[in-house]
Amino acid sequence: MPPSHNHTIKGIVQHLQHEFQGLKSRNTLLQKQDLLGFLFFSISCSCIVLSVYAWKIEIIPTWFMVIWIAFWTSILHELEHDLIHNLYFKKNKFVHNFMLFFVWFFRPLTLNPWIRRYWHNYHHQHSGQVVDIEERGVTNGEKWSLLRLLITPDLVLGFLVRFKRIRREILEEHKKGTFSDKDLKKLSQTIVMGLLPFGIPLTLLFYAWITLNITSFFNLIEINQYIDIQNFNYFVSPVMYVFVIPNLIRQFCLHFITSNMHYYGDIEDGNLLQQTQVLNVWWTWPFQLFCFNFGATHSIHHFVVNETFYNRQLIVRKAHEIMKAGGVPFNDVQSFFRNNNYHPKTAK
């Protein structure tokens, strides 16, 4: 890494840390991190549960409940991310793990968070590299196509259609020594256990639900000869509306933003200036709504990892001034057309 980059990165980190410290000194409530984390957690979970009850007694329509849950689960994602960095109840493992379980339970299509912790920490060490399992899992570095669009929200489908190629690339990195035996063992565990007991069964159930209802609606075959579709929907549709469809919406928005704001492939390992861009161009706002403004705030996290998601929101304007002055890219939408590469010269 050029010495000038090291100097610039240190300057950005110091200025951001100064902003965070000033924010918390002016607002002493922000120093009660455990309390605030549990408050956001409680409100989010309660809003989801209450909306399901309101839907059940027909106060709100299905479409509103789905959108409402998608929004609140975006906050649960931010809480999970903070919990992975041990920002809440670090000394109280019971409460910490209680929160970690329920942010997973309400977002059941996601990776087991205890397993994700390994890959998220690895992501910070090797962001944008071939071995960045977390970001590659959500399509970072893939050529934009209809296939990428389809697999963006779906971890199971994305794994199945890319398994052979990514396996070959990872084994090549293992041979070169850039992916250790420990990493390879953890990856095998992730493949087998990472989306159980929730993700894989619910994904398969979703595709079965879609297929059966399309078949029944268009009367393609006499489906009622084989299954009572009304009885099937009575039990399965609520699961789809509460747990699956809201999270597919949320995951599409989050994965679209994160996979395109992270650079891939042609960046120096560990160079924070090249890892991310700020992606908050006006047309991304429908996506930002369901990933809690991730495109505008996540780059801040790469420079200062030990601050909460709500603090990042509170300093975002000043943080952008600091990062822009330091050369962090903003709204580099051309990277979409070069497979998320950092350097324009690599465009094909």
Image (cartoon, grey):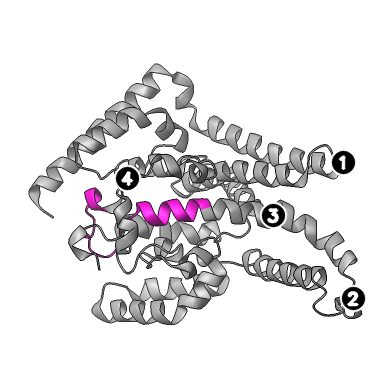
Separation of marks 1 and 2 at Cα, in angstroms: 29 Å
Q: Amino acid at mark 4?
A: Asn
Q: Is residue 81 above or below residue 240?
A: above
The residue at 39%/23% (across/down) is 24
Q: Earlier in the sequence, mark 4 or mark 1?
A: 1
Separation of marks 4 and 1 at Cα, in angstroms: 44 Å
Q: Earlier in the sequence, mark 3 or mark 2?
A: 2
The residue at 46%/62% (across/down) is 138
Magenta part of the chain: 253-274
Q: Earlier in the sequence, mark 1 or mark 3?
A: 1
x, y percentage for residue 195?
Answer: 58, 66
Residue ID for mark 3: 243
Which residue is most to the top?
A: 26
Separation of marks 2 and 4 at Cα, in angstroms: 51 Å
Residue 57, labelled with which disc? 1
x, y percentage for residue 48?
Answer: 70, 42
Q: Of 269 and 327, which appears nearest the observer?
A: 327
Residue ID for mark 2: 224
Residue 154 falls within the magenta-colored stretch = no
Residue 331, labelled with which disc? 4
